Image (cartoon, grey):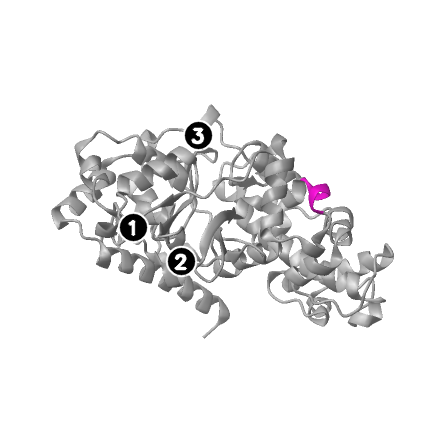
């Protein structure tokens, strides 16, 4: 089977298995589920509240990664549509927009860059890694042991050349993985990543396709909210751009968080209160059980936490201590911004553990906010409590704890949205004109 088909099939099969698991564990009466689905199918996307301020924040494709992080952080958003500076006059949204940049893409780039910086800094000369200082292309990346999108981008050899030209070579034999790089490089890591080329001038456009989390798939104002909810739950999109038929501009930007906050505003309505009063176990929650929760020990390296999120395609981790995994904090994928916006606070990577990182952010970065404390619930909590906690705290996951704060599960925004809907037969192809497989490969 061709690689592209394998990736496409894997993405669809993961979506299918996730949603089937949810539908099989829900204990809601069938008539109630059908009533909810029918109600969401009748609600037009145009009725959903607009983004705060009324204007969708967009990032030009030629923006540097560093400036993109500043925009996301200052606007307190996790992602933004990326515009094509060369297609401002186009009336086709496919020309106007290149995709979405978010912290997921940025963290992938940072970790790949850390690995390359480690390789560059660990080489005494260009010949030590088997490439010339001016070499470019995938062969240079392979010589460094780099794989994946960064190898295809051909950036690895250029990174080595830049490091050699700048005289930034240090110890030989340093491991090429990001955590090892962090453990050994210290300030030199930031010198390469933030001050040396090609990393310093890396643009959003250069990482957009290689580090894509999900397809860029707008819906129109006359689409139904059921369509949006399915995209945000079963099909794992974190955000859905909204356009007006025949016009290229994005009119709204619906996120998982905005939907759950919208559900919270339905409190007091009979249909919502009926479901909200049920214990989470009636909805089959948590879908991610104790043995499936990916966590990080407080004494592990902070870049290992981000690497674990990357490798498992998740947006956050509980920080735990001891064999019983007592929860003492949490790390979110958006926290990567602190490493990029305030590098002077984290120059000593040699002993920077997850807990060191948390304490440093909380005590020294009052100007750019604090890390959100972990939000938890119990196994007997109601769905209404979970929704209220997620909406009022503007967080993306709530951890289920038992006993002495032992983590036994996690509930995400995606899980909550999935509780309210199911997918009618052939829904995607009937609404978009193409199959789910084609959609995930957009």
Query: For the point 30% across and 57% down, which residue is it?
Result: 19
Q: Which residue is mark 1?
A: 379
Q: Position of residue 396 (x, y in %)?
A: 43, 44
Which element carries disc 2, helix, strand or loop? helix
Relative height, residue 382 to residue 166 (above, below): above
Image quadrant holding the N terminus, namely: bottom left
Relative height, residue 436 to residue 40 (above, below): below
Magenta highlight: main SS: helix
For residue 51, which numbered disc appears in the image? Answer: 3
Residue 46 location, quadrant? top left
Label 1: how many Cα within 10 Å (few below 14, some 14–19, many 20+) = some
Q: Which residue is mark 2?
A: 438
Instruction: Inspect this view and state whether residue 86 appears.
Output: no
Q: CA distance from mark 1 to mark 3?
A: 33 Å
For residue 27, which numbered disc appears in the image? Answer: none
Please name whichever residue, 409 or 213, is drawn nearer the observer in this view of the structure: 409
Residue 244 location, quadrant? top left
Q: Is residue 268 left or right of residue 89?
A: left
């Amino acid at each position: 089977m061709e690689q592209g088909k394998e990736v496409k099939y894997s993405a669809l099969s993961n979506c299918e298995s996730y949603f089937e698991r949810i539908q099989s564990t829900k204990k809601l009466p069938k008539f109630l589920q059908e009533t909810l689905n029918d109600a969401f199918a009748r609600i037009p996307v145009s009725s959903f509240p607009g983004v705060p301020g009324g204007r969708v924040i967009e990032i030009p494709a030629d923006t540097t990664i560093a400036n993109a992080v500043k925009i996301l952080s200052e606007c307190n958003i996790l992602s933004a549509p990326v515009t094509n500076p060369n297609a401002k006059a186009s009336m086709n949204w496919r020309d106007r927009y290149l995709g979405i940049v978010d912290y997921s893409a940025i963290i992938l780039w940072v970790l790949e860059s850390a690995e390359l910086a480690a390789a560059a800094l660990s080489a005494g000369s260009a010949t030590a890694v088997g490439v010339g200082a001016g070499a470019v292309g995938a062969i240079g990346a392979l010589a460094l042991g780099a794989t994946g999108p960064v190898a295809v981008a051909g950036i690895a050899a250029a990174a080595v050349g830049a490091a050699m030209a700048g005289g930034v070579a240090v110890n030989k034999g340093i491991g090429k993985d990001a955590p090892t790089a962090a453990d050994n490089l210290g300030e030199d890591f930031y010198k390469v990543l933030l001050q040396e080329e090609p990393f310093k001038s890396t643009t959003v456009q250069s990482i957009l396709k290689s580090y894509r989390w999900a397809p860029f798939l707008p819906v129109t104002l006359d689409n139904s909210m059921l369509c949006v909810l399915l995209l945000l739950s079963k099909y794992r999109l974190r955000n859905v751009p909204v356009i007006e038929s025949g016009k290229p501009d994005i009119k709204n930007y619906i996120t998982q968080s905005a939907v759950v906050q919208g559900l919270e505003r339905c409190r007091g309505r009979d249909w919502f209160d009926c479901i909200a009063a049920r214990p989470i176990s009636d909805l089959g929650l948590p879908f991610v059980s104790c043995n499936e929760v990916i966590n990080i020990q407080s004494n592990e390296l902070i870049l290992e936490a981000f690497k674990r999120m990357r490798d498992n395609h998740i947006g956050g981790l509980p920080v735990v201590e001891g064999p019983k995994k007592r929860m003492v904090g949490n790390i979110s994928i958006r926290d990567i911004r602190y490493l990029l916006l305030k590098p002077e606070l984290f120059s000593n990577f040699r002993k920077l553990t997850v807990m060191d990182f948390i304490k440093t952010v909380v005590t020294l970065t009052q100007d750019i906010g604090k890390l959100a404390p972990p939000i938890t619930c119990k196994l007997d909590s109601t769905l209404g409590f979970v929704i209220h906690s997620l909406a009022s705290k503007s967080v993306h996951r709530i951890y289920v704890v038992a006993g002495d704060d032992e983590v036994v599960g996690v509930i995400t925004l995606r899980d909550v949205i999935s509780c309210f809907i199911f997918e009618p037969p052939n829904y995607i192809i009937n609404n978009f004109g193409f199959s789910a497989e084609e959609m995930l490969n957009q």
